[in-house]
Amino acid sequence: MPRPIQARIDLSAVQHNYLVAKQQASVSDSAAKAWAVVKADAYGHGLRRVAESLRGIADGFALLEIEAAVALREAGFRQPILLLEGFFEPVDVPVCAKYGLTVAIHRIEQLHMIRAAALPLPLPIYIKLNTGMNRLGFTQEQIPALRQELARNTAVGPATLMMHFAEADGVRGIDWQLERFHRMTDGWDLPVCMANSAAILRYPLTARDWVRPGIMLYGASPFAEISAESLGLRPVMTLGSRILAVQEIQPGERVGYGGTFEASRPSRIGIVACGYADGYPRHAPSGAPILVNGRRTTTVGRVSMDMLACDLTDIPDAGVDSPVVLWGEGMPADEVAAAAGTISYELFCALARRVPVVEVGL
Ligand SMILES: *Cc1c(COP(=O)(O)O)cnc(C)c1O
């Protein structure tokens, strides 16, 4: 038998969450199209299975690994596919054209490379504008040169204006970026794509022509203070395992490497078959929430490579073989992430290859 750890991926939840994004992005009677963001192996959930669950449903797929985009095409996906960082080298351009990819353009040199590639058909592009994230994109000062290049570049096909929000989940919000966007695009009549999950949920008026939901597809919340459940989202990944052993310890006894947890009462400690080599965050301190036998308790001591410990003192019916949920159904990944000082995105992406995956729900 393999170790009892397992990641269950509920593909019906992906479909449900995608439709929540679509519905949220329908303001008055205009419905935005939605790129299903499947970068980083669909946030650790498995690109192929997530794409498969959206095969007849998604308007398009967005990612940034060219090989993954090509793999989707070769698996028969006909929707538009958007490369969120565009391409990296001139040799990539004919590949993008051959596989019908849409490319984000964030530097003028990428337009020169397209022009130099002598493509049989114009390449559809997303023009990435830097409105304050200061990661990728053209600034206000670069717009005249950009528009000049676009006006004479016949190798470029239909264009969409794209930007990314830095604080759609925070107090500063989006108005300051929208104002810059409008200044930069004044008199430029092209389709617009700006909203990530946080903007879709909090500012549906930003939906415009296309939206880019990522984390919400996987059933986690982009907001620190709002649960995924209250947003109508369903968890996709449930990381489950079992109790391998139970230790009965006296007050003053410690648990795990470094002895960072010391019992203050007679305690029953459950040892769970899950550690940082499975993707559980090692920096999660004692007190991270965990579900045993369907009941909430907390982790104790340091996370080891293959095991972690939890307090079973108040769950007398729990023992060896009791089922554990590290995150997912019944134990929101967002809460575990918060306890570990990170975000659910990182937990999902860190799921280790050694963890067996089971697909359900299709
Ligand atoms: C990852 C990404 C998204 C999705 O963001 P979420 O917060 O996961 O919804 C959208 N747009 C771009 C450019 C991205 O890189």
Image (tube, rainbow, N blue to C red):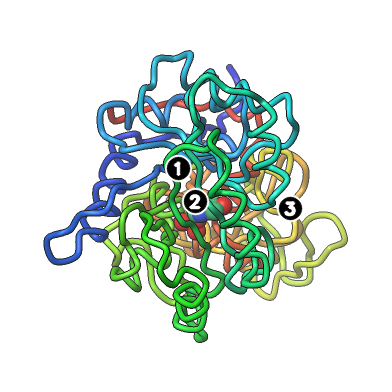
Q: Residue furthest left?
A: 29
- Left/right placement of residue 349 relative to residue 77 reads right
Label 2: how many residues lie within 10 Å, few (<14), some (14-19) or many (20+)?
A: many
The residue mark sitting in front, 1 or 3, is 1
Which residue, given by chain and number where applicable, does mark 2 sit on? 327
- Left/right placement of residue 57 relative to residue 118 reads left
Measured in 3D between alpha carbons, the distance from the residue under mark 3 to the one under mark 2, in whole angstroms, is 15 Å
Label 1: how many residues lie within 10 Å, few (<14), some (14-19) or many (20+)?
A: many
Q: Amino acid at mark 2?
A: Trp
| Residue 238: mark | 1
Mark 2 or mark 3, which is nearer the start of the sequence? 3
Measured in 3D between alpha carbons, the distance from the residue under mark 1 to the one under mark 2, in whole angstroms, is 6 Å
Q: Secondary structure at mark 3?
A: loop
Residue under the point 55% across and 61% down: 336
Q: Position of residue 85 (x, y in %)?
A: 62, 45
Q: Position of residue 46 (x, y in %)?
A: 51, 31
Q: Residue furthest right?
A: 258
Q: Secondary structure at mark 1?
A: strand
Q: Is mark 1 within 8 Å of ligand 1?
A: no
Count of labels shown? Answer: 3
34 or 102: nearer the viewer: 102
Residue under the point 50% across and 48% down: 126
Q: Is residue 133 among the parts visible in the rendering? A: yes
Q: Is residue 333 among the parts visible in the rendering? A: no
| Quadrant location, the N terminus | top right
Answer whether labels 1 and 2 touch (C-beta < 8 Å): yes
Q: Amino acid at mark 1?
A: Thr
Which residue, given by chain and number where applicable, does mark 3 sit on? 303
Q: Secondary structure at mark 2?
A: strand
| Quadrant location, the C terminus | top left
